[in-house]
Image: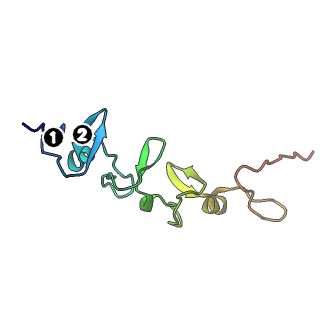
Amino acid sequence: MTERFDCHSCNESLLGKKYVLREENPYCINCYEILYSNTCKECKKLIGCTNKDLSYKDRHWHDECFHCFKCRRSLVDKSFLTKDEELVCTECYSNEYSSKCYECKSTIMPGKKTVTITLR
């Protein structure tokens, strides 16, 4: 008699099929994604086993959905900031929200020190 190798959730045979182990239990791809995959904040679709799951502060994105709210450029492997819970690349953030130098009007980049001088 052969031992069965079934999905822990739906009991479908996993012989010859791809599966995912979670806590030592095998799951078919479909059951695993339904039970454990995160939902992309941008497109609202499940982030499947074959996709990267990028996360920030308990929010998740597909790698192709992880982009700047303003310019839509990818933020994968780039630094970013948040404004009103939206991800913004440092360039857009500095152009839109950073202080400007009173004298030369250049943007004061995030993370730079600013000095306040009070004239008497």
Under mark 1, the amino acid is: Asp
Instruction: Please provide percent x and percent y for residue 71.
Output: 53, 67
Q: Where does label 1 land, which residue?
A: 6
Q: Where does label 2 land, which residue?
A: 26
Q: Residue at x 50, y 48 (%)?
A: 85
Instruction: Please provide percent x and percent y for residue 105.
Output: 78, 65
Instruction: Please provide percent x and percent y for residue 1.
Output: 6, 36
Mark 2: few/some/many CA within 10 Å (<14, 14-19, 20+):
many
Where is 57 relative to 53, above or below? above
Q: Is residue 97 left or right of residue 52?
A: right
Where is 35 relative to 43, above or below? above
Residue that sits furthest to the right in the current view: 120
* Among the two numbered marks 2 and 1 on one chain, the one whose residue lies closer to the N terminus: 1
Residue that sits furthest to the front in the current view: 1
Instruction: Please provide percent x and percent y for residue 18.
Output: 25, 51
Q: Quadrant of residue 12?
A: top left
Of 21 and 101, the residue lying toward us: 21
Q: Is residue 21 left or right of residue 102?
A: left
Contact? badges 2 and 1 (CB < 8 Å): yes
Under mark 2, the amino acid is: Pro
Disc 2, SS: strand
